[in-house]
């Protein structure tokens, strides 16, 4: 269940929602928002297709609710129920975020237990230092990253590339080989 239902401030201008507004007016838009609220309250974000009850909740005619649910591609509709894919994705993201734990001095490096174990396995000697580096960088530069494990891996890859380039540039034997060709 989503307790807070934030949405984009320009939701009314989304193409599918614009179609709802064009056909059903602001009353249809209001009904759409009420339907979203009802879906957000349900555990699986799924509601039975009882258009009479939904119309009563939204304060509009049954035909309008049915049209909003079935005609605009805003919902995934089955024989008996419908869901809002956007709410399902949002809920899944919230669950993933809730399972992340805070690491580092500032507690701003977020990793799930599985991600933390992967980090320990990939960088057994310096995983804590890598967490601290990311945490300090984020704090001092005001940066945010979507995936902290991916960021640490990316930084490690770039570090390896720099080391390889530096070794090639500073190795006189390799330079001689290059001159011979």
Image (cartoon, rainbow, N blue to C red):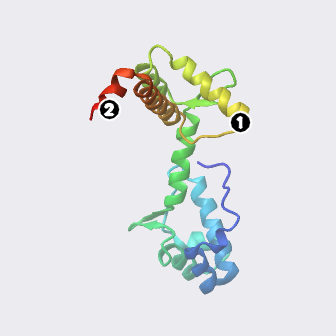
Q: Quadrant of the C terminus?
A: top left
In the picture, the disc for residue 110 is none
Toward the viewer: 4 or 59? Answer: 4
Q: Position of residue 7 (x, y in %)?
A: 66, 60
Q: In front: mark 1 or mark 2?
A: 2
* Image mark count: 2
> Viewed as shown, does residue 16 lie left or right of 136?
left
Q: Position of residue 34 (x, y in %)?
A: 65, 66
Could you tell which of marks 1 and 2 lies nearer the N-terminus?
1
> For the point 38% across and 68% down, which residue is it?
79
> Viewed as shown, does residue 33 lie left or right of 49?
right
> For the point 60% across and 86% down, which residue is it?
23
Q: Secondary structure at mark 1?
A: helix
**Residue under label 1:** 141
Q: Is residue 25 above or below residue 93?
A: below
| Residue 14 visible in image | yes
Q: Secondary structure at mark 2?
A: helix
In the picture, the disc for residue 178 is 2
Query: Which residue ends up furthest to the front in the rendered image?
Result: 180
> For the point 60% across and 66% down, which residue is it?
35
Query: Which residue ends up furthest to the left in the rendered image?
Result: 181
Q: Position of residue 142 (x, y in %)?
A: 72, 38
Q: Is residue 77 above or below residue 161?
A: below
Toward the viewer: 142 or 181? Answer: 181
């Amino acid at each position: 269940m989503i307790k807070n239902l934030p949405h984009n401030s320009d939701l009314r201008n989304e193409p599918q929602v614009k179609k709802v507004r064009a056909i059903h007016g602001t009353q249809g838009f209001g009904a759409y928002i009420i339907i979203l609220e009802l879906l957000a309250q349900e555990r699986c974000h799924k509601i039975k297709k009882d258009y009479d009850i939904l119309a009563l909740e939204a304060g509009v005619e049954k035909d309008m609710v049915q049209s909003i649910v079935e005609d605009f591609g805003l919902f995934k509709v089955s024989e008996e129920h419908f869901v809002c894919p956007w709410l399902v994705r949002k809920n899944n993201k919230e669950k993933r975020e809730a399972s992340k734990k805070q690491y580092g001095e500032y507690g701003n490096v977020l990793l799930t237990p599985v991600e933390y174990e992967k980090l320990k396995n990939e960088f057994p000697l310096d995983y804590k230092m890598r967490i601290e580096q990311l945490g300090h960088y984020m704090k001092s530069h005001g940066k945010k990253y979507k995936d902290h494990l991916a960021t640490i891996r990316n930084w490690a890859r770039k570090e390896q590339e720099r080391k390889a380039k530096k070794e090639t540039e500073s190795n006189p034997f390799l330079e001689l080989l290059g001159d011979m060709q």
